[in-house]
Amino acid sequence: MKSLEHVVPPLDTGPCSSVGRGHSVPCGKAAVVGLQCGMEWARPQYSHQEINRSGKVIANALAHEDEVDRALEIINNWRSSHAYPLAIFQAQLRAKIRRLNLESTIAQRIKRLPSITRKLKLFPKMKLSQMQDIGGCRAVVSSCIEVRKLVNSYKNSYSPHFLHEEYDYIQKPKSSGYRGIHLVYRYSSASKPAYKNLRIELQFRSARQHAWATAVEIVDHFTRQALKSSQGEEDWKRFFALMGCAIALREKCPAVPETPSERHALRKEIREYERKLRFIERLDTYRAIFEPPPFIRKQKPQIFLLCLDLEEQRIEADVYKDAQLEEAFEDYAKAEKRYQGDRWDIVLVSVKSLSALRRAYPNYFLDTSLFMKEVKRAIR
């Protein structure tokens, strides 16, 4: 796999944060744009026609190796080019969080190549150049009330960027049980025309909504399903739809479509599916298996390279300081070549601390305590 993973240096006060300063984000043959702080950022080097054609190639299992190599070069440049606007949006998000005085966990990522490929296969008519979540930033706050405060702060204040789409999955939950609010912006800046109209998706969730989404990802990892994309076994899909409704009612929000809104009937059905799937037992086992290696707990790194072995149910991890960004990218590329196939999930993440990593990416450390509490509450 010739892809770059989703490392974007965390920003505390804006794009000139000390994290990542002075380093180049590897981007193949991509040209770079320099910032005042000395950091270099990839910018788009290919036409939308070439990008869309490359998307078709990687979604085609019969594509020739030479075609795939060229397609990966183009796609990696396209992915990397979203890093700069994503960094700007994350800085703005942190500023809003501070002004609103909210407790939050913020994470950002560039969409992984396997996720892009799956999405293009699932939606054959989709054009890669129009995919709205190549660059994404997420804020998890304590409640739905705070989610609304954050969304209103965006909608009621000036922004040079264009609000392209709004998806309110709290007021209108997905039938899968997923809830949250997404705002899709098109980047605009007179001083950085290279990035004009690149789309960045902002996701806002309550802590319970995030716990639900995390549990879905964990089950996807271990059962080899695609529940996150509304595909997979019917029993699992039904269980998560029911739990999505239970959490919605607890947050005094609209119920998930086609689930019981009467609490007694909802509790009875959740209890039946929990017993059938042995969900609590399974999740307890997963949590016991995946614990941060001791050498990680003793350090305060900026960057983690995580290799999740789904068959052996173990995790391999390397840690890097911010000055080792280039080394981390090199090791990531080696890991993707070494660990291929559905057995492995490789991720390179950059966060301020281990505790932030566990909150923002709990699917890798299986910190499922909040969702487990919600399940036990729902079946009591």
Image: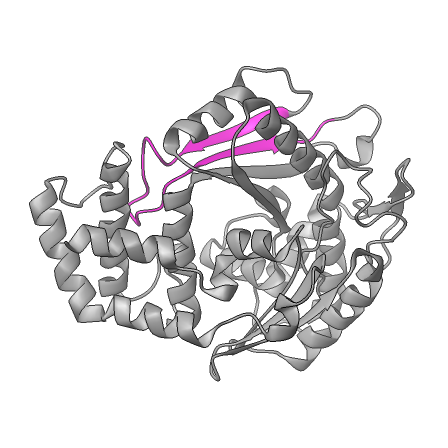
Taking the view exactly as shown, the residue that stands out farthest to the bottom is 312
- The residue closer to the viewer here, 124 or 73, is 73
Q: Is residue 290 left or right of residue 108?
A: left
Q: Quadrant of residue 334?
A: bottom right
Q: Give the residue drawn at x 49%, y 26%.
A: 151
Q: Give the residue drawn at x 58%, y 47%.
A: 127
Percent x, y of residue 301: 71, 60
Q: Is residue 153 left or right of residue 173?
A: right
Taking the view exactly as shown, the residue that stands out farthest to the front is 298
Tell me: residue 48, above or below residue 155: below
Percent x, y of residue 275: 16, 68
- The residue closer to the viewer here, 174 or 144, is 144
In the rendered image, the quadrant that contains the C terminus is bottom left
In the rendered image, the quadrant that contains the N terminus is bottom right
Percent x, y of residue 110: 64, 51
Q: Is residue 65 left or right of residue 340?
A: right
- Visible residue check, residue 132: no
Q: Quadrant of residue 158?
A: top right
Q: Is residue 139 left or right of residue 40?
A: left
Percent x, y of residue 279: 26, 67
- Visible residue check, residue 259: yes
- Asked if residue 184 is among those painted magenta in the image, a careful observer would answer yes
Q: Give the residue drawn at x 31%, y 34%.
A: 172
Q: Which residues are magenta?
A: 162-188
Q: Quadrant of residue 319?
A: bottom right
